[in-house]
Amino acid sequence: MISIALLRHGPTQWNAEGRLQGRQDTELSDSGRTAVADWRLPEQWTTADIISSPLRRCIDTIDIVRAAHPNLGSHAIDPRFIEMDWGTWEGRTLGDLRHEKGGAMAQNEARGLDFRPDGGESPRDVQVRVMPALAELARQGEDRLVVTHRGVMRAIYAHANGWDMRADPMDKLSRHALQVFNISDSGQPTVAALNVRLS
C-alpha cells in the first residue's frame, strides 16, 4: 500500500470568473501565483516524487511549489490525471448553463457520476481512466504527490467513499489543501486525511 497526496493547481482567472476550464490550457493568474508561493507542504511530502496533469496550470504550480521545497523529487506527467473534459461547455459558467438549459440541465446534474457535459466526459469516465493509474503507482511502491484538478480529486474521493454524486458529499474538499489517500495494491483508494493545510 502507498499513499498519494492530491494537490489542486493554483487559481486561474477562469477560476475567479467561475468558468469551466476542463481541457483548456489556462495559466495561473498573478494572484494565483502569489497564493501558491505561500503554500508549504507538510514535511512528509517535501521530498516526494511528483506526478501531474500535463496542463500548464499544474506545471506552473509545481514550479512555484518546488522553489519553496527544493528537495522535491522527480516530476513525471501522466495524462490520465488531466481535468474532466467539459466538451462544448468549456469557458461557460454553470449559472449560465442552468439558465439556458433549465430542466434538462437539472436532470443531467441529477445523474451524479453519469452527469455528462455536451461532448465531454462524465465523472465515471474520469474514474475509469484514473483508477488504472492509481494501481500502477501502487505497484511502484512509492508515495507520490499528485498535482491535478478538482474533477479528478472528486472522482477519486467518490470512488473511495462509494459516493454516487447524486447528493452532497460527506466532506467538502478544500481547493487549496492536500487530500491524502491510501492506495491498495489493487488501486483502490481509501481516505487517509482530507483538507491537510498548506502552511
Image: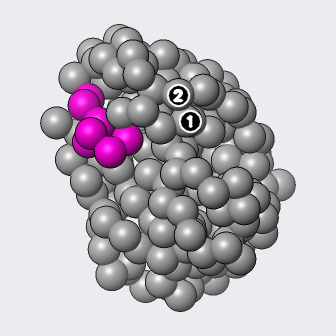
x and y percentages locating residue 52 in the rendered image: 62, 37
Task: Give the Cα separation between the discs numbered 2 and 1.
Answer: 7 Å
Q: Are marks 2 and 1 in contact (CB under 8 Å)?
A: yes
Q: Secondary structure at mark 2?
A: loop
Q: Quadrant of residue 148?
A: top right
- The residue that mark 1 highlights is 50
Q: Secondary structure at mark 1?
A: strand
Q: Residue at x 31, y 66 (%)?
A: 193
Specify whether residue 77 is painted magenta.
Answer: no
**In the picture, which quadrant includes the C terminus?**
top left
- The residue that mark 2 highlights is 73
Q: How many C-alpha atoms fall within 10 Å of the one at disc 1: few (<14), some, or many (≥20)? A: many
x and y percentages locating residue 95 in the rendered image: 45, 54
Along the line of sight, which residue is nearer the eye, 93 or 122?
A: 122
In the image, which residues are magenta? 39-45
The mark lying in front, picked from 2 and 1, is: 2
Three-letter residue code for mark 2: Gly
